[in-house]
Each structure stands twice: as C-alpha cells, then as structure tokens.
Image (cartoon, grey):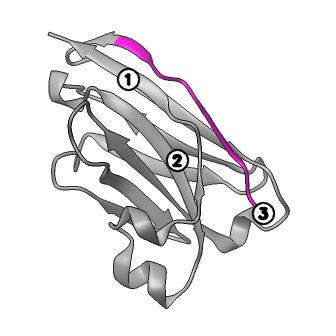
C-alpha cells in the first residue's frame, strides 16, 4: 500500500513558478513509478509528467517548463512548474504504480495507476 499526500498548490500570476510536493508512505516507494496528472473543470484528467529511475516523460504542453524529480530517501516526488500559464490551472494529482512493462507502455493513462493523492489546486491568473 502507498498513500500519497500532495502539497504546494496555490494562486500564482502568469509566468510565475510553483513547486508541488507529493509525500508517500510505505517502504516500497523506490519501486514505484510516479506521475503527476491534472484535471481542469469540465475536462478529463490528463498526464503531465512521470518517471522512474533516470527516465522522465512529459506532456507536450509542459515540456521545457515543468520538471519532475524524486527523492527516494524522503519518499517524495516533486513537480517544479515554471513559466506558468492560465491554461495550467487545474487540480494536480500525484499517482503511483509499481514499475514494470505495463507502466512503461501506458504511463500516460490514468487507469494504469492504482494509488492517488487527494489533489492540490493550482490557479494561474493572467
């Protein structure tokens, strides 16, 4: 079992930055691939960034602006968000799934992940 708790959301002006954190419980954190998704009102949940080991993956809409990283010693994954845009406004969710071929093939799909945080709101004003 892995429990995830996000923090770091808030209100920021366009072109500003925020860093989201996701603290995980459990002794098997290092064996899990981690990802960030987001969901805006009236829209489906969408993949933002994910990674395991030295490999990271990003949605085209955030490439060059967002960075996912993790600290296995602290059981924490981060999402550094720079040059924020109003269209980045959404609830951001942290997700975890044991690393394996299924995750590697389908990491952009929300239904791959068995563990989710409660979400944190990010609002970007213009």
Query: Mark 1: which secondary structure?
Result: strand
> Circle 3: is it few (<14), some (14-19), or many (20+) Cα within 10 Å?
few
What residue is pinned by disc 2? 94
Instruction: Tell me which segment is drawn in magenta.
Output: 1-11
The span from disc 1 to disc 3 (Cα, nearest Å) is 27 Å
Q: Earlier in the sequence, mark 2 or mark 1?
A: 2
Quarter of the image holding residue 83? top left
Separation of marks 2 and 3 at Cα, in angstroms: 15 Å
Q: Residue at x 47, y 42 (%)?
A: 93
Q: Are marks 2 and 1 in contact (CB under 8 Å)?
A: no
Q: Which mark is residue 1?
A: 3
Residue placed at 21% from the left, 35% from the top? 42
Residue 53 in which image quadrant: bottom right
- Tell me if 125 is positioned left or right of 107 in this view: left
Q: Position of residue 116 (x, y in %)?
A: 57, 51
Of the 4 image quadrants, the one containing the C terminus is top left
Left or right of 71, for residue 92: left
Where is mark 1, residue-wise? 122
Instruction: Give whichever of 69, 8 is nearer the camera.
Output: 8
Give whichever of discs 2 and 3 has the lower sequence position. 3
Q: CA distance from mark 2 to mark 1?
A: 13 Å
Q: On the rendered image, what quadrant is the N terminus found in?
A: bottom right
């Amino acid at each position: 079992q892995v429990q995830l708790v996000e923090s770091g959301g808030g209100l920021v002006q366009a072109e500003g930055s925020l860093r989201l954190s996701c603290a995980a419980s459990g002794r098997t954190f290092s064996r899990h691939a981690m990802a960030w998704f987001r969901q805006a009102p009236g829209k489906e949940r969408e993949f933002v960034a994910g990674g395991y080991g030295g490999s990271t993956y990003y949605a085209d809409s955030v490439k060059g602006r967002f960075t996912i990283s993790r600290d296995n010693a602290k059981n924490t994954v981060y999402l550094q968000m720079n040059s924020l845009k109003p269209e980045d406004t959404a609830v951001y969710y942290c997700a975890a799934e044991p690393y394996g071929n299924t995750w590697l093939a389908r990491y952009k799909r929300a239904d791959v992940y068995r563990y989710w945080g409660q979400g944190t709101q990010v609002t970007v004003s213009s």
